[in-house]
Image (cartoon, rainbow, N blue to C red):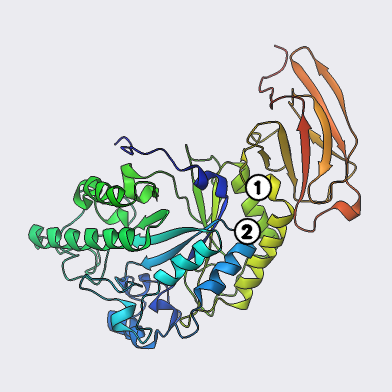
Amino acid sequence: MERLRLMPMQPWFSDAKLGIFVHYGIYAVDGVPESWAFYDGRVSREQYMGQLAGFTASRYEPDAWARLFARAGARYAVLTARHHDGVALWDSGQPGLSAARDTPAGRDLVGGYADALRAHGLRVGLYYSHSDWSHPDYATVRHPSPPAGIPVNDNRFSAPGPGAEDPAAWRRYLAYRDAQVVELATRYRPDLLWFDGEWERSAEQWGIDALAEQVLAVTPQVVLNARMLHRGDYATPEQGVPMRAPDGPWELCLTVNDSWGFQPRDHRHKSVGQLVRHLAETVGAGGNLLLDVGPREDGTITPEQTARLEGLGAWTARHAEAVYGTVAGMPPGHHYGPSTLSADRRTLYLTCFDPPRETVSVRGLRSAVRRVTVVGTGAELAHHVTGGLHDVPGVLWIDAPAPADVDPHATVLALELQGELELYRGAGRE
């Protein structure tokens, strides 16, 4: 289906470059995989839902979250307002499970989050799952052609058994889902709605067009992710930088360790250097990084994840001009590393993950270079061109920066061009 979006894509999204994904819910009580733990049978549904009694949010301070996210260099965040388990983090007017009614937290956890983000200049994103493996009307119709490799109809929480479909119950479920989404849009005026769970039904079964029109009537400027199917604004690859950037705006969803929600036994945290690399490679390919953290049930973010966010923020603060408001840089092959380009296409930023030795080279650069400096220190570097014949430009050689100007995670060089960036992409003399 063609994308039917009527409003233009909001420029803030592509300029933001870094967002924080927050998977927060009752699954943090026992530290089990969010929703999937009972879907896959790792725990019983009764054991999973028993976590409702332990979800206190007793140390939840959304302002502390917002301050941490701002220090990380993020420009927006996305909170799991309702995951596949059906537990809403706000006091929903719809029937169903909610932290306000069914847990010791006993209050709306979304409103304070939205207010805190805005107070610190961050855009507000809310995650909502189309699927709800707790709602009594959910498992009442089957996907007409399930995606290959995903056993979406083999679980009693997802779809009915053969011959047990109930279209009337499914219509009740859609009315409930639509009402909750409109409730979120109306109460909290999110800048972004991040949908999930779309694989369990077709676009027609979901009533995607009707839902999109209801949302846009309330918040016409809201950004929708691709899990709103043909009504989405941007692609959402997960857990690995794609080898080819998706067409149009996109965002890489990446966990700090290996888990989305809080799992105390998962100590496989990525280093600050690895996160810097993920950010630089994603931004260099024209995308945003949505970096995920999983708070404990009390609302606190672990020291390990806090340290990673702050370390990443220190790097983004030093290299802000090469990150925010830029566009994708050169295709692979011109430079051994990612690059970005200023919005006016007159400054090219080269990222060097390893300390440069002797020189940094750029191939196929037709634009003349006026000046080269190290971002963050301002040190100016000598440069010259060798070779070149007819249409084929020579190689630009840039002297390596001094050790004092080398960043411990990634050094960035700014090339001020005489005019807009122009590249040679040919095969040489034929």
Which SS class for mark 1? Answer: helix
- In x, y percent, where is residue 217? 27, 48
- One can see residue 355 in this view: yes
Which amino acid type corresponds to the residue marked 1 in the rendered image? Val
Direction from residue 162 to residue 282 in the image, left or right = right
Q: Is residue 253 above or below residue 25?
A: above
Q: Is residue 112 above or below residue 217?
A: below
Q: Is residue 245 above or below residue 62?
A: above
Q: How many marks?
A: 2
Name the image quarter holding the N terminus. top left
The one nearer the camera, 154 or 182, is 182
Most extreme residue toward the front is 119
Residue position for label 1? 323
Residue at 44% across, 82% down: 57
Q: Residues within 10 Å of mark 2 (few under 14, many from 20)?
A: many
The one nearer the camera, 304 or 6, is 6
Name the image quarter holding the C terminus. top right
Which SS class for mark 2? Answer: loop
- In x, y percent, where is residue 266? 55, 75
Asked which quadrant contains residue 32, the reply is bottom left
Direction from residue 206 to residue 11 in the image, left or right = right
- One can see residue 23 in this view: no
Asked which quadrant contains residue 104, the reply is bottom left
Q: Is residue 428 above or below residue 102?
A: above
Direction from residue 193 to residue 177 in the image, left or right = left
Residue at 27% across, 71% down: 92
Q: Check residue 73 in the rendering and tell me which mark sits there, or answer none.
A: 2
Mark 2–mark 1 distance (CA, rounded to whole Å): 10 Å
Which amino acid type corresponds to the residue marked 2 in the rendered image? Gly
Q: Residues within 10 Å of mark 1 (few under 14, many from 20)?
A: many
Q: Would you say the residues marked 2 and 1 are in contact, meaning their CB atoms lie under 8 Å apart?
A: yes
